Amino acid sequence: MSNGGAWPTTAMMPGQEEPIEGLVLTATEDSLLLQTDESAGDAPGAATLVPDQGGRAQNAAQRLADMVVRAEAYHLGTAERLLPLFTTPSTKHTPAPRPVESAAFGVIVDKDPVARRSRLMTQIAELARSNKRMIVLCPTHRAADDLLAALARHLKLLALPYRSLLTRYETDIPRLDGALALQELGFEAQMHQFFARARADKAALRRTYERFRELTPILAYKAEKQRDLNEVTLLEWRLLNQMSDLQGKLKEVKATLEAYESIPVWKRLAMQTMGKNSGTLPDYARLYEDQIQNVMNELEVAQQRIDELSPEAAIPKDMRPEYEELKEEIQRVGGTKKIRELIAAEEQANRQAFLQNKRIVVTTPARVATDPLFLRMRFEVMIADEAPLIPAPFLLAAAGLARERLLLTGDPQAMESTPHWGIGLERDSATRLVVAR
């Protein structure tokens, strides 16, 4: 398996007629870790593996050809800073020229891998605080997982939201790293969690909208009945006032009739000029009594109507707060029209948009060079960890995606002894397979 990532292969399992497609993630002296989309059984036994290096090499070659044809779509000015590293020296003892460090190019070289890793973690944290989008390349999947674990611990120590910043694209080796579940940082796992939450949010939004639509006509009906109730209540108040006035006038007329003979003559004459005398006062009394009876009849009708409207206009105690809360939530989202659009929109897994939102993408060079998704991805910074172990074509293909800065790390002796950055293929005598060191 060449440096730079998983090795596509076809496996023929004993007792099975159909081949199984998969990726070799890691290789040791006596074993291979193969990831497949199909079950290989509990005990596959001795399997026949057919490598497919040609397909991946063809994809990488197409990517490099595309960079030449569509140079304006890539950042070749940044990638050109790597060319001195790939220049073959004129003599065996002449070291390869090294590019000059600048704001657009940097190297972290140290014989001590712990110190080298510490400096790299510091650089990545500073870039993350500056909101830079980074693609971090590791020679193998195991190296990518190790770097992912170290980076997650470092960002967590700095109180940075490593779960939202980090992603491991795309294949990860299934294992746990202490208290950190690295599988949660895998791209596919994050995509699954994101869309699971999106579906849950969409279902909650649908329930909110449906409940809002259910309560809206009910409260509108209640409001209409409340307006009717207010009008009838106002009518009742007017009738009660009218009846009170009529009762007062009737009482006054009756009192006048009882004391008519004792009323002074001059006052009687004044009452007569107003049409009130002993002969007309009983007529006034009957008129007031008839009017009082009519008002009482109207008042009875109004009170019956109030009794009918009161329960119809009454709103349950919890309904109004619930409605106001739903209304506030709908306004926060953007209104009912926006909600209808969100509910009607089909859910599609936009892998590019999801990956674009991550600040730090940890992956292997072969994945970047061969995955069509990276045709449209661009970053501010490309970081190549243990750069001498990464083949030059893959490194160049990834460098064309970074528009601001390249950062390489590695052992100084390895950098000096790898002047042309060769592909570095080896063949393991035990497995008879090409493996990565």
Image (tube, rainbow, N blue to C red):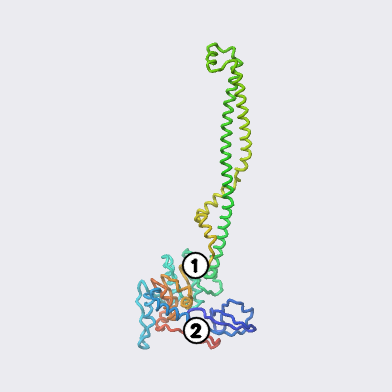
Q: Residues within 10 Å of mark 1 (few under 14, many from 20)?
A: few
Depth check, front residue: 131 or 337 = 337
Q: Is residue 360 above or below residue 344?
A: below
Q: Is residue 228 above or below residue 141?
A: above
Label number found at residue 354: 1
**Residue 70: x and y, percent?**
40, 76
Depth check, front residue: 190 or 279 = 279
Q: Secondary structure at mark 2?
A: helix
Q: Secondary structure at mark 1?
A: helix
Mark 1 → mark 2, Cα distance in angstroms: 30 Å
Q: For the residue marked with disc 1, what is the amino acid? A: Phe
**Residue 326: x and y, percent?**
55, 52
The quarter of the picture where residue 47 lies is bottom right
Q: Which residue, given by chain and number where applicable, does mark 2 sit on?
A: 54
Depth check, front residue: 181 or 200 = 200
**Residue 204: x and y, percent?**
57, 58
Q: Is residue 181 left or right of residue 100?
A: right
Q: Is residue 426 visible?
A: yes
Q: Is residue 410 visible?
A: no
Q: Is residue 411 above or below residue 239?
A: below
Q: Is residue 222 left or right of residue 422?
A: right
Q: For the residue marked with disc 2, what is the amino acid? A: Gly
At 58% from the left and 50% from the top, the residue drawn is 215
Label number found at residue 427: none
Q: Residues within 10 Å of mark 2 (few under 14, many from 20)?
A: few
